[in-house]
Amino acid sequence: MQSQKIDVTFLVGCIVKICPIAEIDIYNIHPASIGNHGGNGMYGLAVHKHVLQEVIDLISRGRKTLSDKFYTYPTIHEVEVEYDAGAPLMVGAVEIPTKFIEQLLSSEINLYEAAEMLQKIVLPYEWKMLPCAVQMAVQRIFDKMED
């Protein structure tokens, strides 16, 4: 990438570790908050399962109720050596439908099915975020050139 003079790269659907490269801005898109739901092995449905498990835990401990709104936060972040540790470039907020949580709590659906349903909701938001994040990253490059 350095020999081709690439300035910015976005990892989308990448499940292998990519380390930072000097003078290349590399970003990754993650389907949830990287602070709570990031790290080694946290990709694909594993992330959505983790988000839903957190919701179930909050309800079971009485911290939240079904009448509360729950969100997942797709994040586009800088790539660092440590998995999902880079600074966020963009964070979205996607409401988790109450019906998923109700069905999960009543055992109408299992965690895997609920995670698949949540993924189908989050993916279009990631796709909408990506072009904006590319524009933001390019603007950062232009700003560096002016300094």
Image: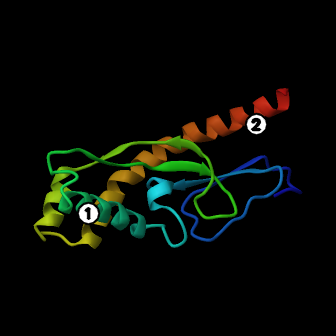
Identify the element where label 2 is drawn.
helix
Q: CA distance from mark 1 to mark 2?
A: 42 Å
Q: Count the marks: how many?
A: 2
Question: Which of the two residues, 119 or 61, is positioned nearer the viewer here?
Answer: 61
Q: Quadrant of the C terminus?
A: top right
The amino acid type, in three-letter code, at marker 1 is Asp
Point 48% across, 67% down: residue: 43
Left or right: where does residue 7 sit relative to residue 70? right
Instruction: Say how the picture is coloured.
Output: rainbow
Q: Which residue is mark 2?
A: 141
Of marks 1 and 2, the one in the foreground? 1
Identify the element where label 1 is drawn.
helix
Pointer 1: residues within 10 angstroms few (<14), some, or many (20+)? few
Q: Can you give x and y, in whole percent of width and height, for residue 59 in the image?
A: 20, 58
Residue at the right extreme, as displayed = 3
Q: Can you give x and y, in whole percent of width and height, for residue 131 in the image?
A: 56, 40
Q: Quadrant of the N terminus?
A: bottom right
Pointer 2: residues within 10 angstroms few (<14), some, or many (20+)? some
Q: Are marks 1 and 2 in contact (CB under 8 Å)?
A: no
Point 83% across, 49% down: residue: 23
Point 22% across, 50% down: residue: 97
**Picture quarter containing residue 39?**
bottom right
Left or right: where does residue 51 sit relative to residue 105? right
Please tell me which of labels 1 and 2 falls first in the chain: 1
Q: Can you give x and y, in whole percent of width and height, for residue 98 in the image?
A: 18, 51
Residue 57: assigned label: 1
Residue 90: assigned label: none
The amino acid type, in three-letter code, at marker 2 is Ile
